[in-house]
Image (tube, rainbow, N blue to C red):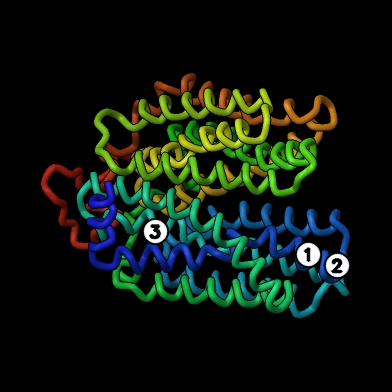
Amino acid sequence: MAAGYLDILRARHAARLLAGTLVGRLPNGTAHIAIVLFTRAEGGSYTLAGALAAAYGLATAVGQPLLGRAVDLYGQPRVQLPAAVLSALGMAGLALAGLGSLPAAYAAVVMAGVFTPPLEGGLRALWPTVLGREDRVHRAYAMDAVAQEIMFTLGPLLVMVLVSLRSPAAALLVINAVGVLGALSVVLSEPSRTWRSAPREAHWLGALRSPGLLALLGAFFFVGLALGSITVAGVAYADDHGRESVYGWLMAALGLGALIGGVAYGAREWAGAPERRLRGIVALLAVCYLPLTLTPGVPAMTALAALAGVFLAPAIACSFIVVDRHAPRGTVTEAFSWLVTTFGVGAAAGTAVAGPAVELGGTAWSFAVAGAGGVAALLVLMTTGRVLAAPGRTAAVVAGSENDRNGAAEPGFSSGHKA
């Protein structure tokens, strides 16, 4: 199992690109908790903290696909690094100016969100150049999903350490400065500097003109909704049991399950169409969300949370392959950025729906939102099966177009796209 991942990391540039991307995404992965802690330290209410965090999230959702399209048009260094600097300046403005002027505070978080660099989509566009073989790229997608789980676990801990050592303002400044360094490491690498998107057809919809991509985005909105609702439901469950630490156990178990599932998924080669495989994974994801509505005792609930996480990372990794197959020629970074945006918007919707669900029917109802989200995602994939069965590309790795300026493709790989 480990040999396959080590094979990827030994490839030239691979470890640097993965590490640089994760470090560069730290500001985004920790922004919500950092904004809340900063707002409370400045004397702001929880309502204001939530509003600022929501403004940041919505701004990020708007900015990601726009910046992704810019990357496809102008290359990675011209977009990623300036965006990272502007995003960091936005957060620095919030940290240094405080909450004396609320319009300025909102402007700062919106600036930080809109200019969050699309490093996640950019990395997935680079993997075929760096790794070459299709099986290695698929394994890299799984490794990427696992690395995300690690980042979203360790990132908040890093924020808490910085807050305890200095202050929430210092945490904002340090995390975003480190993020710029991560982006700099990526864009100075040879694969990022030389990568060019394939020529694209001029169309105002960009990647969204692909019916298959739209179907996938529809499904992953509901996957995001399910995950977002669990974060609220977990708080309600912890309140029911009178211990805040219970929430930490549930979230840690969810992350551990995703980590195990992602590692196992990437450790083997998969035959057959990824679209069909994705339906099966999402079906298992939905099935594992449903038992959470039983809300048993803490040990059993922790085990159910771990089970609920097992198929999350495989679903994300498989979705990367499907995105690559359905993205119109010349829109690969934008397409990946749309997936990130849709998932994030779904998660925000899940947190919004789960709150009223707790008020109306208790904790079990809030976990039922997660189960309903999983089932809805599966229904979208099943009802759009014909659309997804006709990918825009014939192979998940198109070495001779998006990622190879010399047009050299390895044997067995498609060297072009279908429109």
Say if 120 sits above or below 233 in the image.
Answer: below
Is residue 305 visible in the rendered structure shown here?
yes
Position of 397 with respect to 376 (left or right) is: left
Residue 163 horizontal side relative to residue 134, left or right? right
Residue under pointer 2: 102
The residues bearing labels 2 and 3 have C-alpha atoms spaced at a distance of 36 Å
Task: Kindly identify the residue that appears in the image at 78 percent across and 64 percent down.
Answer: 106
- Percent coordinates x, y for residue 304 in the rendering: 57, 31
Which residue is painted at 88% across and 59% down in the image? 45
Task: State the image coordinates of residue 25 (x, y, percent, origin top left).
Answer: 52, 63
Residue drawn 43% across the image and 50% down it: 146
Disc assigned to residue 202: none
Residue 93 seen from this side: no
Crowding near pointer 1: few (<14 within 10 Å), some, many (20+)? some
Residue indicated by mark 1: 106
The image shows residue 183, relative to residue 72, as above or below, that is below
Q: Are marks 2 and 1 in contact (CB under 8 Å)?
A: yes
| 185 w.r.t. 73: above or below | below
Q: Amino acid at mark 1?
A: Tyr
Quickly name the residue at label 3: 123
How far apart in space, not on screen, are marks 1 and 3 (Cα)? 30 Å
The one of 379 and 310 positioned closer to us in this rendering:
310
